[in-house]
Amino acid sequence: MNKIKLEPLAALSIRMGEKAFSSDVVRSFIQHLDLSPGDPLYDTCNSICDWYREAVINGKYYFLRYLRNLLEKSDEKHLVIILAAGKSPLSLELLNNSYGSIDRILEIDVSGVDEKKELYDRFYPQYSNKIKCITADISSKCILSLLKNLLEEYYNDLPCIVVLEGASYYLSVGDLENIVASFSSCDNRNKMLVEYLLSDEYISDKRREIPQRIFTSITDFSGIPGITRYGIKDLKELFDKTGGELIEVTNLQALEKERLGTNKYFSSPEDGWLEYSVWQI
């Protein structure tokens, strides 16, 4: 099987964040991917901020840490839904660490999931039986309605964890509202993890230029029409509409300190431009 050639943005995400993963299975998985289409975008981002990868690694570290802790402490098996999954190796890392706590992982993206499933089936059969890949646009109301019915009819006895990593800033506010509503449960037993890009007012003057230039380069390179930015108050208003409750929120300063024991790049919350929150929905 030839290496899978990635879209530039997907290649950038994996190349920037691969050091967050520690398992041999993930290192093996990445060897099957052709990351070269992302080289021009990677070089551009590095020319803007040569330590930008630290922000990406901190974020992936958070998702892995939170999910591992949640799964290890729970007596129930969970359904995990990864939205806009791309070629992220998150499923393999989770199953490598918490296989018995996961009933099924659903990976959803608009393209490329069939070849990813083929890769799973061929090289990682010990995990592929628990991964279902679905080709779908997560902003489509029709698709979201079908997914909601799927949860209510086939997975209604399982608590669900929805992961939205590296995608909220490419969705409109309305799209995100629809997603939250679609995965909300009547008893708030589901959880949703969201990474989001902060509005300028929450970022220090000395750091605002970094995300502005990075995401301008991304949109110019990929043709994405625009970027959506939030503060935690904006998200609270959005989740309040369906009765969602905030469990926790963290930032790049806190995550760098937790991961490395010190703060080298993010000495205050305002030095970062990304935040991460978990919601009961």
Image (cartoon, helix red, strand yellow):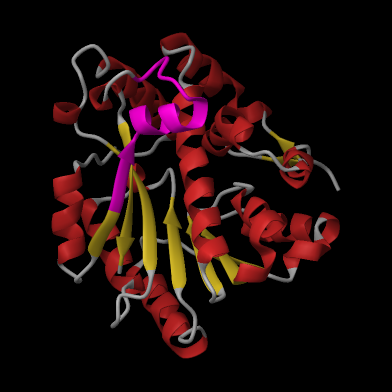
Observer-nearest of 198 and 260 = 260
| Quadrant assignment, res 138 | bottom left
Quarter holding residue 31: top right
- The residue sitting at 64% across, 48% down in the picture is 89
Q: Quadrant of the C terminus?
A: bottom left
Count how many numbered circles sit on residues in the image. 0
Pick whichever, 71 or 163, lies toward us.
71
Question: Which image quadrant is residue 29 in?
Answer: top right
Q: Which residues are magenta?
A: 248-266
Q: Residue at x 37, y 39 (%)?
A: 224
> Measured from the top left, where is residue 257 in percent x and y?
42, 27
* 143 and 100: which is toward the camera: 100
Can residue 19 be seen by looking at this rendering? yes
* Identity of the residue drawn at 44% across and 76% down: 147
Q: Is residue 243 left or right of residue 186?
A: left
Q: Position of residue 116 (x, y in %)?
A: 69, 55
The correct choice, above or below, for 223 with respect to 112 in the image is above
Q: Is residue 259 magenta?
A: yes
Residue 223 covered by magenta stretch: no
Is 38 positioned to the left or the right of 164 in the image?
A: right
Q: Which percent across, then down, holds residue 21?
A: 64, 39
Say which of 8 and 176 sits in front: 176
Q: Residue 150 in the image: state x and y as whole percent.
A: 47, 82
Whether residue 110 is visible, yes or no, is no
In this rendering, is residue 111 above or below 229?
Answer: below
Identify which residue is drawn at 21% across, 25% down.
Answer: 203
